[in-house]
Every structure is written in C-alpha cells, then in structure tokens.
Image (spheres, rainbow, N blue to C red):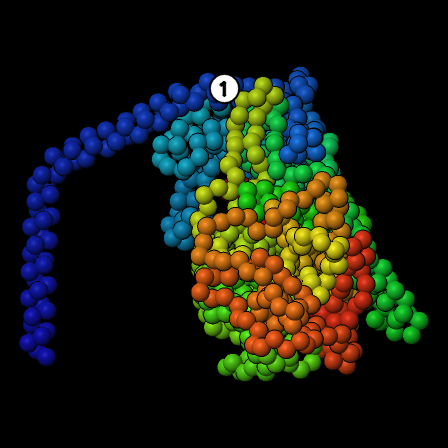
C-alpha cells in the first residue's frame, strides 16, 4: 500500500515539473506568442468580417428592394397595390382554387397606435430595449450567453427585432458565422435607413406565425377571427408566444405548450408596463388578474383539458378552428387546396406571390372530386340517419342517458376518401372530412391515423404469397389458435375447418391471417410496411407494436397511407409516391417547379405475389366474399377490394355508456388504374351502427359507378409485367384448375388467375358430379359474433341487398389524438 502511495506521489512530482517547464517556456516567449495570437485574431476577424461584407454587398440591392416594398406597405401613404392571385388548376385546366397571399391592409406606422396591446406584448417578450438600442442589445446578448452556458444548451437568444427583420429579409437559410455576420451588416443598414416605427411595423407584417400565416394581422384573423387591433392581452400573448418557434409553440399543433408560453408572455407584460405605448390603457390591477383572465380566455375559446390512458394531458379548443377557407376566393376542393396553399406559401417568397400570377397545375380531377364528395355525403348521411333513429328508439324506451350519448355522437360522425392512380401516384380525388358545417375542415385523409382492421390483410397475404408459404388455392385450416397466449376470434362463432386461402381472405377469416403473419414474421412485415410507406424502420417499429394482432389491423394508418399500401400492390410491388402538383408557372409560362410521375420506382414486393393478391382480393367482391357485387352476364369483372370493420369494445364504464356499434369502417377498392380508400368514423372513437361493406363499401361503389358511367374505366385490372408466372382458370369453390369435363361442376369460375411457375393449383380428385361446398353460407343470427354486423350485396344498379353477417374484428382501442392538421414549416 505504501509502495503504491509513493509511486503516485512521484508521478505527481514529475507532472508538476513538466507543467513548470511548460509555463516557463510560454512566459519567456510571451511577447512573441501574444503578437502571433493578436495577428492571427486580426486576420480571422478580417477574414470573417470581410467575407460577410462580400456576401452583404451581393445581397444589398435585393434587400433594399424588399425593404422599400415593406416601407411602402407601412407608410402613411399606403400603396394600394393589388397583389396577383395564385390559381390552382385541376388536371384538365379548370380553376378549382384561387387565393391571395393576403386580402387585407397590413399594419402601418399611422395605425400602430391602434395595436398598443400587441406592441406591448411583442416588446415585452422579444425586445424590451427596442427604442433605445441601435440594432444590437449587448445586455441581452450577454444575458443569453450566460444563460446558455449555465444551462449548457441554446435555450435563450439575444436577437433584437431589427436583427430578426434582417434575418427575415435576407433569408440566407443555413445558420453559420458568415450568415450571422451578414445579418449584422443588414441590421445596421436597417437601423440607419428606417425609423423605429417603420422597423416595428415591417417586422409585425413579416414575422411567420405558423399554419401558413405571415404577419400578425393574418395570424390574428386565422387564430381568433378578428383583426390584430382588437386582440385582448391574452390573445396577443398567445400570438406573440409563437414567434420563437412556430412549429413548437403553435396552438393548433401543441396547445398545451402554447398556453404555457401565453402565461409567460403575460407575466412579462405585467413586469414591463412602461413598454405599453399608452399606459393609461392597461387594465386596472393587470398582474393580479392574469389567472382570472386566462380562465375567461379558456372559456371563450372552449379550451378543454383531458387525460389520455397514461395520464398525460390532452388539449382541445376552438383556437384556429375557423381559419381555413377565408383565404380562398374560389375553393372547389377545400382539403386538397389547403395543402396546395400551404406548400406555395412555404416555398415562394412574398414578392413572388404578390408580383407574379402563379398557376399551379395539379393532379386532381374535379369531376372525380365531385363524385367523391357526393358519395361520401350520401354514405355519412345514411349513418347519421341510423343514429337519429337509434336516438329516437332509446328516447321512446326511457333510456335518456343512451339517447343523450347518441345525440352527442351524431354531429361529429365524419369520413374521408382518397382516390389515386397507382402507376403515377397522382391523387385524383381527396375529401378530408364531411361535416354539416364546412367552416373548418380537418384533413382526415392525410392526418388521421386509425386502426385499418381487416383491410391490412391484403399485405399479409401478399407477403405470404411472396415467401411461397401458400398460394390462393392452398388448403389452410380455420381453427382455434393459441400462440404464446394470443387467441384471435373470428367475426362469426366457431371455425370453418379446412378452406382455401382465397376463401379465407374473401371471408376475412381472422385465424388464418394470424397464422400467416406468424409464419411470415412480424419483423419482416414491419420492414416491408416501412419500405412501402417510405418511413424509417425505427419509426415503423415505434408506430406498430410487435404482436400478431397486426394481422387484424391493430397498427394505425391514415387513409393516405393505406392507399399507398394498396397502390403498391397495384403497381406491381414498386414504390408509390403520392403526387399532387404537376408544375407551377407564372402567367407567362415560366416554370418554377415541376414533378415527374412515379416512374422507375424501387421494387419492394414481387410483382407475381402482388398479382396473386389482387386476384384474391377480387374474391372479396364475389358471392364467396363479404361484399358481393352482382354483375351483368358476360361482363368482365374488373373490381377488387377489402372491407374492414373495427368493433367498439362493449365497456359499460366507457364515456359511451356501453353503446353497441363499430368505431372504424373501411373499404379499399381497386379498379383499372385506380385505388380508392374510404374511412368512416368518429374522431374520438365513438360507436355507431354500420360495417366496412355496408357503409364504406357502399360509398366506394357509388363513386366507382359514377366514374365508370360518366368518365369511363379501363379494361385491365392488373397491368402487364415481367415475372415468373403462369395464368390459369381456377374454380373458386375449391381452388382446383377448371377442367373441360362434363362432370366438373363449378359455381364460381375465375379466369386467368396468376400463379408462380411450379406452384400451380391442384386438379380435383376424380370427376364425381357434385354440388361444391359454398363457404359463404347465410349465417343465422346466433352464429354471428355480433348481431350488428352484416355482409352486403350490391345489385347492378348499386343498390344494397341481403344483409346477413360481416367482416369484423374487435381490437384494443388506440389513443385517439384528435389534433388538427400538423405541419412542418421547415419541410413543406
């Protein structure tokens, strides 16, 4: 022990000696090193300052032009220049949307006095010494440096309003030292050329405040439906709280965080009353009334706080609820146009938008859009009618509590629909929601993630075909399963025994889907799903829980994402990227932006397996499936699809008081060069009467029949491809090859079905004339797992007949996050 201590002391003595020598070396040569350091520092300073000045010199003319335009907006002699509009055209050139960057007069120096509350909030939060500094606030910079060093992260900035205006005007993009120094030159230029009132007014007109809103006037109208001059201190504080990070502090995206910022800004205002341009206007005992006024604010905007299943707070409100359609002069496809407008505002500068007349050529087909809107309206209205009848029945039976719950569900029932071309990815129709009031529209087609139920089985079967685990004619047993404690139920009571794989998908047999996923492997399934959706595998792993209920649709997808899954099958397994915009030009034809169709995309799935899956999905719409489409004699059958119904668990203690029904009904339909996905449900998962075939399937069929009769439809469901396959005629009754023999009986013949070479369907053993077993028996009520469910049949006119049973699955309810549209300003 003593030996070790002595060694340690010796080491310290040696190190101390070396340190003394090093210090002595630098001390003796201190003048030389200081001189070299000074020269090097001066060189670096001149290098960075000179380089930044070169950049500034190149940008000065553009900045001057922009600032002069901004000054004309804020001057007392306001130039009433009428900005040019942006026109959105459908694929045939029809105008379906038209909007202006702004359709109101901006804040000016002569009306700043009407915006005293807003000015007070901005100065208190963003730049308290604005009227006393000359562009830089050295105190704020020092305070920010100390705070960031203490917290060991960039938690506070020291930028003045002048610096922020310089940053907005230069718009240099990436943050680095050169750009920061260039912004410094611009800041000094702004301070030397413009008055403080002009700088403040220009800043208030140019600051980005989330959800596509530029300037406080536009944002005030969007979030609160009032001009900026009429904002209360609470409204102004919420608006100003967005400024540092619009994607984080936006009340539409993150209401809880925005409310926290709002309170912070209000207390900043209370601590700085001298920043109010007219202190006499400050409400009496303002600081003491902040909490009370916040409660009033929350009441006015119906701010509600609830808890999710894990106890985390969830917020909802009417802030920003009515801000969507005000921007359009023409708006024939609101959900689609809203996305286009957002893209345009984020991609193009204010000058481009106001000085050029932009034409946006899109993929949307306005005729198909109208058919989609009509079909969805009729379908949702039919469910609402059923709910109205249900409410009346409960009322007549004296069940007032159930009648009240039903009445609350009815107005919020909605749906969405998306239709696209799988070969190009072109979106031809998009309806994000159907409400009685169209004042606000939440784009459920792209933003709402719900459990897709049995519609996901198409991918499970395609992967099983690709791995050659089974083919459509393979025999597989519908039986009770127990896989590591997981035992799925069918939508009917009992089990069918041995059936073909085609019949299993046609009748949506849950046990078979789980069996196949178990053999495919959950990891492989998630890997393929992430590739199809173009999301990282890490995100897919986080979104889709690793359990066998994925085979029944327990993972959550948006209608857009589900349409991409089916489009990939239709596109021969090649990646599909949804596309909305073809090109953007000005009125003179100068092109600023263009896209290419979904050509030469990555091969994700084997094309033969995809063709087999589509053939098998056709059986869903025949007499053997859950949604029968009657067709005229000799007419080619060019339809395929899958129903999906997610049952609402019967929980007496739930907020729905044990109401029976379903919470999500889906249909994914395929026709030549088209994939259409329909979802109907309630944003918060409330139960309602219906099924995938009876509701969503009916909406799809109405839409498809309109398109077919008025616009025409192709004559080939599966596009030509190169692969290891043969096409044979098969009998759906038992999966055998159809034989030219008088003793061969087949009720449901299928022609030109795809199979891998070497994996053909079997011949029927012997030639005994017999009636084939029809697996789709008309189940008695006691044989159906839930008496609300139904199989649907549609005649050639599209009318629904003969309800008996359904494709349905009961899944654990997901956490429904009924948030409004979320966007990333940095990545349009």
Residue under numbered circle 1: 64
Furthest residue to the front?
A: 742
Residue 459 in which image quadrant: bottom right
Q: Where is residue 174 in the image (x, y as percent from the top left)?
A: 41, 37
Residue 427 horizontal side relative to residue 381, left or right: left
Residues 205 and 477: in front is 477
Residue drawn at 90 percent across, 70 percent down: 393
Residues 532 and 748: in front is 748
Residue drawn at 78 percent across, 78 percent down: 781
Q: Position of residue 166 (x, y in %)?
A: 48, 29
Give the SS element for disc 1. helix
Please indicate, yes or no, whether residue 418 appears anywhere in the rendered image. yes
Q: In this view, does 401 lie above or below 313?
A: below
Q: Is residue 647 above or below residue 595?
A: below
- Mark 1 crowd level (few <14, some 14–19, many ≥20, 10 Å Cα): some
Residue 56 in which image quadrant: top left
Q: How many discs mark residues in the rendered view?
A: 1
Q: Position of residue 621 (x, y in %)?
A: 68, 61
Residue drawn at 66 percent across, 34 percent down: 90
Quadrant containing the N terminus in the rendered view: bottom left
Please indicate, yes or no, whether residue 338 appears anywhere in the rendered image. no
Q: Is residue 277 above or below residue 284?
A: above
Residues 321 and 599: in front is 599
Residue drawn at 67 percent across, 52 percent down: 636
Q: Where is residue 251 in the image (x, y as percent from the top left)?
A: 63, 49
Residue 668 horizontal side relative to residue 6, left or right: right
Residue 181 horizontal side relative to residue 760, left or right: left
């Amino acid at each position: 022990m003593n030996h070790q201590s002595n060694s340690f002391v010796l080491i310290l003595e040696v190190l101390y000696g070396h340190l003394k020598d090093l210090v002595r070396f630098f001390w003796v040569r201190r003048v030389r090193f200081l001189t070299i350091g000074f020269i090097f520092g001066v060189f670096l300073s001149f290098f960075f300052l000179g380089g930044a000045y070169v950049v500034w010199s190149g940008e000065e003319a553009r900045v001057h032009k922009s600032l002069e335009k901004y000054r004309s907006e804020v001057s007392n002699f306001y130039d009433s220049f009428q900005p040019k509009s942006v026109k959105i055209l459908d694929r045939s050139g029809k105008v379906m949307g038209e909007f202006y960057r702004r359709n109101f007069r901006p804040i000016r120096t002569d009306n700043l006095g009407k915006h005293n509350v807003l000015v007070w909030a901005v100065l208190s939060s963003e730049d308290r010494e604005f009227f006393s500094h000359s562009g830089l606030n050295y105190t704020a910079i020092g305070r920010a440096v100390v705070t960031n060093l203490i917290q060991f992260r960039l938690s506070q900035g020291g930028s003045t309003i002048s610096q922020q205006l310089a940053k907005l005007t230069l718009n240099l993009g990436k943050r680095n030292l050169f750009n920061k120094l260039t912004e410094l030159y611009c800041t000094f230029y702004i301070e030397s050329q413009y008055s403080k009132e002009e700088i403040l007014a220009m800043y208030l007109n140019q600051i980005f405040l989330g959800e596509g809103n530029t300037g406080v006037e536009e944002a005030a109208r969007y979030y609160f439906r009032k001009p900026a001059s009429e904002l209360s201190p609470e409204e102004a504080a919420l608006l100003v709280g967005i400024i540092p990070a619009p994607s984080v502090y936006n009340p539409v995206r993150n209401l809880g965080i925005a409310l926290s910022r709002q309170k912070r800004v209000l207390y900043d205002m209370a601590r700085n009353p001298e920043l109010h341009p007219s202190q006499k206007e400050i409400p009496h005992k303002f600081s003491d009334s902040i909490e009370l006024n916040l409660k009033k604010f929350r009441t006015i905007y119906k701010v509600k706080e609830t808890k999710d299943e894990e106890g985390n707070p969830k917020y909802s409100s009417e802030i920003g609820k009515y801000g969507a359609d005000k921007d359009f002069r023409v708006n024939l496809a609101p959900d689609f146009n809203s996305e286009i407008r957002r893209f345009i505002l984020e991609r193009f500068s204010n000058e481009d938008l106001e000085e050029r007349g932009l034409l946006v050529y899109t993929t949307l087909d306005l005729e198909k859009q109208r058919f989609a809107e009509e079909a969805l309206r009729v379908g949702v209205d039919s469910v609402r009618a059923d709910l109205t009848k249900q409410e009346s029945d409960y009322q007549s039976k004296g069940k007032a509590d159930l009648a009240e719950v039903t009445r609350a569900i009815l107005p919020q029932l909605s749906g969405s629909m998306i239709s696209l071309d799988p070969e190009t990815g072109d979106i031809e129709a998009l309806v994000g929601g159907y409400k009685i009031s169209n004042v606000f529209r939440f784009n459920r087609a792209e933003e709402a993630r719900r459990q897709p139920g049995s519609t996901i089985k198409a991918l499970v079967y395609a992967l099983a075909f690709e791995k050659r685990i089974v083919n459509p004619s393979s025999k597989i047993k519908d039986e009770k399963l127990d896989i590591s404690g997981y035992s799925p139920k069918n939508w009917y009571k009992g089990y069918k025994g041995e059936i073909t794989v085609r019949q299993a998908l046609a009748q949506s047999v849950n046990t078979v889907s789980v069996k196949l996923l178990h053999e495919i492997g959950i990891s492989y399934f998630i890997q393929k799903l992430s590739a199809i959706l173009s999301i990282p595998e890490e995100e897919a792993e986080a979104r889709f829980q690793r359990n066998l209920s994925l085979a029944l649709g327990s993972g959550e997808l948006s209608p857009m994402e589900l349409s991409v899954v089916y489009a990939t099958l239709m596109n021969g397994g090649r990646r599909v990227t949804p596309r909305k915009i073809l090109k953007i030009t000005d009125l003179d034809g100068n092109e600023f932006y263009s896209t290419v169709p979904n050509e030469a995309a990555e091969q994700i799935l084997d094309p033969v397996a995809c063709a087999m899956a589509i053939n098998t999905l056709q059986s869903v719409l025949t007499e053997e499936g859950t949604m029968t489409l009657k067709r005229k004699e000799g007419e080619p059958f060019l339809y395929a699809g899958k129903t999906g119904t997610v049952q609402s668990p019967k929980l007496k203690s739930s907020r729905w008081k044990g109401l029976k029904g379903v919470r999500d009904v889906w249909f994914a339909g395929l026709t030549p060069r088209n994939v259409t996905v329909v979802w109907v449900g309630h944003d918060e998962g409330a139960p309602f009467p219906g099924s995938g075939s009876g509701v969503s399937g009916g909406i799809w069929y109405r839409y498809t029949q309109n398109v077919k009769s008025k616009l025409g439809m192709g004559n080939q469901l599966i596009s030509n491809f190169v692969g290891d396959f043969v096409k044979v005629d098969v009998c759906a009754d038992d999966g055998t090859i159809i034989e030219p023999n008088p003793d061969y009986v087949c009720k449901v013949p299928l022609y030109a079905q795809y199979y891998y070479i070497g994996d053909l369907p079997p011949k029927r053993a012997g030639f005994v004339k017999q009636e084939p077993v029809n697996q789709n028996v008309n189940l008695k009520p006691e044989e159906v797992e839930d008496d609300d469910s139904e199989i649907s049949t549609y005649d050639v006119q599209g009318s629904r007949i003969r309800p008996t049973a359904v494709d349905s699955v009961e899944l654990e309810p997901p956490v429904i996050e009924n948030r409004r549209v979320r966007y990333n300003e940095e990545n349009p």
